[in-house]
Image: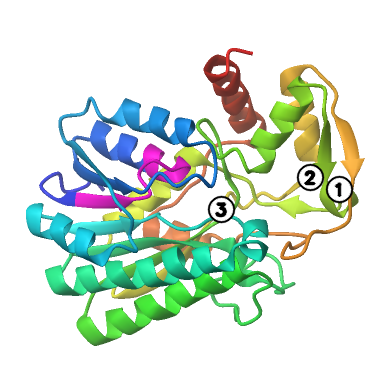
Amino acid sequence: MPLDKNQTTLVTGAAGFIGFNLCKKLLENGNRVIGLDNLNPYYDVSLKKARLERLKPHEEFLFNKADIEDLPKLKKIFRDQPIDRICNLAAQAGVRYSLIDPFSYQKSNLEGFLNLLEMAREHRVSNFVYASSSSVYGKNDTYPFSTEDRVDTPVSLYGATKKANELMAHAYSHLFDIPCTGLRFFTVYGPWGRPDMALFLFTEAILKNKPIKVYNHGRMKRDFTYIDDIVDGTIAALDRPFPYEVFNLGNSNVIGLLDFIRVIEEGLGKKAKKEMLPMQPGDVPETSADIQKSRDMLGFNPKTSIKEGVGKFLTWYREYYKT
């Protein structure tokens, strides 16, 4: 189903990995996009700026350097521009960093999220889509993870804030008839990816002949999901307003960590030096997405294999960093 090109979408976190790719696809489809990002230094800001430089030539793209915690700035943006729907991808990301700076999660993921819900209420947007996370499943050990499962046992503050987002969105949906859809993303990877994620860290270390850190002694499994598939699912959610829904966006094909490393090694033609380490606080041994609901209601159909997706990332990495 094509997007309504007469609508303007506010994408927060527009300079981030998923936000950039979503903006790019929306613009290529001929849509108007207002991007918002605070360009925080959680990881290399030059990468965020490089992403933005590829969006700015589009006539239908308007960028605002702003923080979702800044309610007066948000109010001004909504006054100055007609915004029909919101896709909130802005957040303080990272499971491990939430043990170091918990208050950054409170400010962005809770206060900032509430500010956006208030803007959605005040301006009667047609749809409010937001990034949740597979981290909400926490201690759940029933695989694959289903949106019908209880998610009352988070093992990180990051996961707890994402579950809080789902609860806050439900309240606003119920009270003010705002269509709200949460997307539980599962280990997103691909070109322009985040430098704090495993694929980026492993690639960088292997090329520099440095050891890679392999947690839980390699006994980890992840539902790696390619960025283009995530973007397609997000656009499907934007175009299908529901009173309130939560969906899993995963590849539904679990890969062992050591197998994942082998795919990278094959793509680089180089063996990794492995430093085997115990499980990290806040981490979980496996993530696995039940995506039947997403298939049925969003038409979500991930197409990219791990070998193809990793290959595309490695090609981008070598071109971008001139290795």
Residues at marks 1 and 3, CA–CA distance in whole angstroms: 21 Å
Closer to the N terminus: mark 1 or mark 3? 1
Can you give x and y, in whole percent of width and height, for residue 201 in the image?
69, 36
Residue type at mark 1: give it: Gly
Mark 2: few/some/many CA within 10 Å (<14, 14-19, 20+): many
Can you give x and y, in whole percent of width and height, for residue 53 in the image?
33, 27
**Range of residues picked out in magenta:** 9-21
Can you give x and y, in whole percent of width and height, for residue 147 in the image?
54, 72
Mark drawn on residue 218: 1
Mark 1: few/some/many CA within 10 Å (<14, 14-19, 20+): many
Question: In the rendered image, which residue does mark 2 sit on?
Answer: 257
Residue type at mark 3: give it: Gly
Residue 94 drawn in magenta: no
- At mark 3, the secondary structure is loop
| Whether residue 95 is situated above or below residue 229 in the rendered picture | below
- Give the mark toward the camera: 1 or 3: 1
